Amino acid sequence: MWFTKFKVFDEKNSLSIIVRKNKVQIYYYPVNHYIKNKRIHFITVCLIKGKEENKINYFKDLKKLKKARQGRKLDFLEKQEDFFIMVTSLSINQELRLFVDVAYNPALIHLKPVIWNEDGWEEFEVASIERENLKKLIDAGESKYKLKLLEFKDKKIKNFGFLTMFPELTDKQQNALEFSLKNGYYEYPRKTSLEKLAKSNRLAFSTFQAHVRKAENKILRFSIEAIKK
């Protein structure tokens, strides 16, 4: 199967501006699209990552798009903690229609969620039986956005990612694990200790350690079982 990995950046995209402004990271799947009232509507399922204050401000800014008269408009938003489903839309024109036909080609397989990083760059991993489908996707992306092609080749696919694939962690466990990872605790050699991380979070060492260890236990158990299968 043919595979490609690339990054795109759209400076003027309203959703990208909101991501960059609030320094959050969005994991999403572009599920589908439909046309109604001369607009193309995009259905997206998402997970948001980042500081709690940043996430709150992200949704505040996102909801402002409900009143947008030009550009991207928010038509629907349903949120449960960090998971949300949204439908946004754009006025239809021939150029957009052609781009959507390529980007939402049913012959494309999104192997993992698109990662929308804090700096606005979106990371895609897409596969297709036919090379031409991916070539058209890359060409369309280069004509519309800044695009960095990272990989494009024929290879066997070994995995597929889901937004809800891993076991559910509590907010405290997730925050402790992400903070530890971000600050080099899992690098070799380690750049910090749990004692220092606990102090930075203004938590007792035993409390912070418990959050990290419980999160590690859940993920490791799940991962080992998945490998066995």
Image: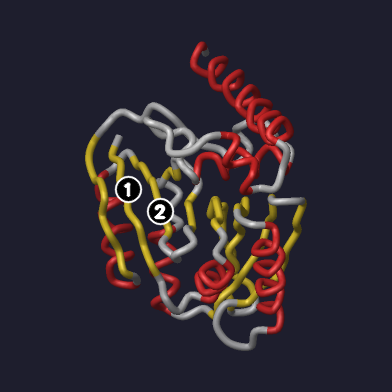
Give the residue at mark 2. Answer: 123
Along the viewing direction, whichever of 144 and 50 lies nearer the viewer:
50
Q: Is residue 28 above or below residue 140?
A: above
Whole-Å distance between the Cαs marked 1 and 2? 7 Å
Q: How is the image coloured?
A: secondary structure
Along the viewing direction, whichever of 211 and 133 lies nearer the viewer:
211
Residue 46 visible from this viewpoint: no
* Marks 1 & 2, CB-CB < 8 Å contact: yes
- From this viewpoint, which residue is outermost toward the bottom? 69
Seen at 73% across and 63% down, the residue is 77
Q: Within 10 Å of the Cα at label 2, are there few (<14), some (14-19), or many (20+) other Cα atoms?
A: many
Is 3 on the left-hand or right-hand side of 85? left
The percent coordinates of residue 195 (x first, y second) are 60, 35
- At numbered mark 1, what does the secondary structure look like: helix, strand or loop? strand
- From this viewpoint, which residue is outermost toward the top? 228
Query: Could you tell me the amino acid type at mark 2?
Result: Glu
Residue 101 visible from this viewpoint: yes
- From this viewpoint, which residue is outermost toward the left? 153
The percent coordinates of residue 185 (x first, y second) are 49, 36
Is 93 on the left-hand or right-hand side of 28? left
Is 53 on the left-hand or right-hand side of 33? right
If the image is split into quadrants, where does the N terminus sit? top left
> What is the number of the mark on residue 218?
none
Along the viewing direction, whichever of 145 and 215 lies nearer the viewer:
215
Seen at 30% across and 46% down, the residue is 4
The percent coordinates of residue 141 (x first, y second) are 33, 64
The percent coordinates of residue 151 (x first, y second) are 25, 46
- At numbered mark 2, what does the secondary structure look like: helix, strand or loop? strand
> What is the number of the mark on residue 5?
1
To which quarter of the image does residue 184 belong?
Answer: top left
